[in-house]
């Protein structure tokens, strides 16, 4: 076991998978069109909607022999 090794892991909570795929596709389409939109004078801006949240307690899967510790992107708010 190597407790100093960790990796981030993602377990998304997706309630409506088809809606999720549609939203991801629309964002990806905009990123692909960004340069042509810029040439038309349209600016594409991307923001992080959780910039002011301090993650106090991460969800962690502890390391076991043969697997690194895994940390999720989500966190518990107190």
Image (cartoon, helix red, strand yellow):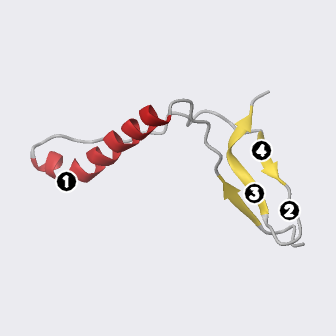
Determine crowd level at label 4: few under 14, some 14-19, many 20+ residues with C-alpha closer than 10 A: few
Q: Which sits in the foreground, 21 or 52?
A: 21
* Relative horizontal placement of residue 42, taking residue 69 as reference (left or right): left
Q: On the image, which quarter does residue 9 sit in?
A: bottom right
**Residue to which mark 1 is pinned:** 35
Determine which of the numbered discs, if any, sits on residue 5 in the image: none
The x and y percentages for residue 28 are 33, 48
* Placement of the N terminus among the 4 image quadrants: bottom right
Q: Earlier in the sequence, mark 2 or mark 1?
A: 1
Marks 3/4: CA–CA distance = 9 Å
Marks 4/1: CA–CA distance = 38 Å
> Mark 2 against mark 1, which lies toward the viewer?
2
**Residue to which mark 4 is pinned:** 59
The x and y percentages for residue 7 are 71, 62
Q: Earlier in the sequence, mark 2 or mark 3?
A: 2
Q: On the image, which quarter does residue 2 sit in?
A: bottom right
Please name the residue shown 23% across and 49% down the image. 34
* Placement of the C terminus among the 4 image quadrants: top right
**Residue to which mark 2 is pinned:** 63
Question: Please, what secondary structure does the residue beneath circle 1 have?
Answer: helix
Eyeballing the image, is 58 above or below 18?
below
């Amino acid at each position: 076991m190597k407790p100093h090794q960790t990796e981030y892991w993602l377990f998304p909570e997706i309630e409506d998978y088809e809606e999720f795929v549609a939203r991801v596709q629309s964002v990806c389409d905009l990123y692909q069109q960004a340069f042509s939109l810029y040439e038309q004078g349209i600016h594409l801006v991307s923001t992080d909607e959780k910039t002011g949240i301090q993650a106090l307690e991460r969800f962690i899967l502890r390391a076991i022999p043969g697997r690194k510790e895994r940390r999720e992107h989500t966190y518990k708010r107190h």
